[in-house]
Image (cartoon, helix red, strand yellow):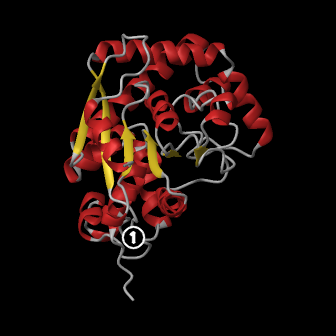
Amino acid sequence: MTNQIDQTELPPAICLLGPTGTGKTALAMKLVQEYPFEIISVDSALVYRGFDIGSGKPSRAQLALVPHHLLDIRDPNDPYSASDFRQDAIALLHDINSQGKIPLLVGGTMLYFKALRDGLAVMPAASATVRQALIDEAGQVGWEALHKRLEKLDPVAAIRIHPNDPQRLQRALEVWELTGSTLTELHTTQLAKQGPALPNKLHFFGLVPNERARLHEVISERFLLMLQTGLINEVCQLRQRFPLTSSLPAIRSVGYRQVWDYLEGAYDYSTLVEKGIAATRQLAKRQLTWMRSWPELELLPISLCSKDEFFLPPALKAIIEAATK
């Protein structure tokens, strides 16, 4: 008996990715109502309980109509990793296949998609000595200077790691100090052989807005609406319910990080609005950068100006209908 999986025996899993604010959830819910899909969320904020408003989590009514996997599965003080996602997603692929349905993976956390597609590289264990040296250096020259160093060492990683993300920046430089190889090199040449194979081929579709200016408007409107509907109160309640710190991945999520700093007195409300919108736009830019380098990604140009029901692109419809025959 072989451990190899014949992916031709199953329809491809459909992966729908794109920058924040492009309507991925709306399209996914439309697809589930027309075809035998089950949704697997690919979002690093939606996994956390209580992270509802700032993450754009579907409402209870929407979830009752169209359930999503990998929502509300962790407390925010219990970090969820790309490795956790890959393990959980592969188990769900098998489960959905066994029900005669087709997996539909939807979200904007590109690292999760990459981990699922490529596997995970073997990384060196953390070094307290190297880590502290980098922290001390950042205290003297600033994280921006360390980010410029990473740009020279590993420009691919520097694109996806923001200068204001010290934990990931520190880790990337730590890996270089410990191994003499960059994160990108390790992910390319040292992919771990451990873990199960994918039961399905992955077919990637990327939503791309026709007008970048309109995407910026949508992002601004969404963040203002989140504040109006209680995002600050949501973070206050999370601080009361869970033992949280600003270093946790959940709190570093866009929107939550800015509200946290506001509650800590770092700046006033108008600055919160400004920083929250700017951080979300930067996230969208990084997501689009990931997508430009994504192999075999079928781009689906969309208009964010239309208020009509989501139009199902012909390329996606053809793949779906072939898979569901």
Q: Residue furthest front?
A: 325
Q: Which residue is denoted by mark 1 in the rendering?
A: 197
Number of numbered discs: 1
Tell me where residue 129 appears, x and y as whole percent: 47, 66
Task: Tell me the residue at 31%/49% (across/down).
Answer: 203
Task: Tell me the residue at 62%/23% (across/down).
Answer: 262
Task: Tell me the residue at 74%/36% (across/down).
Answer: 239
- The quadrant in which residue 303 appears is top left
**Nearer to the camera, 212 or 64:** 64
Q: Is residue 135 visible?
A: yes
- The quadrant in which residue 124 appears is bottom left
Q: How would you rate the neighbour count of disc 1 (Cα within 10 Å): few for under 14, some for 14-19, many for 20 or more?
A: some
Q: Is residue 295 above or below residue 3?
A: above
**Nearer to the camera, 232 or 98:** 98
Tell me where residue 90 appears, x and y as whole percent: 48, 62
Q: Amino acid at mark 1?
A: Ala
Q: Residue furthest bottom?
A: 1
Q: Is residue 313 above or below residue 193?
A: above
Identify the element where label 1 is drawn: loop
Would residue 76 appear left or right of 82 to someone viewing this image? right
Tell me where residue 153 appears, x and y as whole percent: 22, 53
Task: Tell me the residue at 45%/46% (across/down).
Answer: 104
The quarter in which the N terminus is drawn is: bottom left
Would residue 213 appear left or right of 72 to someone viewing this image? left
Tell me where residue 301 appears, x and y as whole percent: 26, 25
Q: Is residue 136 visible?
A: no
**Nearer to the camera, 277 or 170:** 277
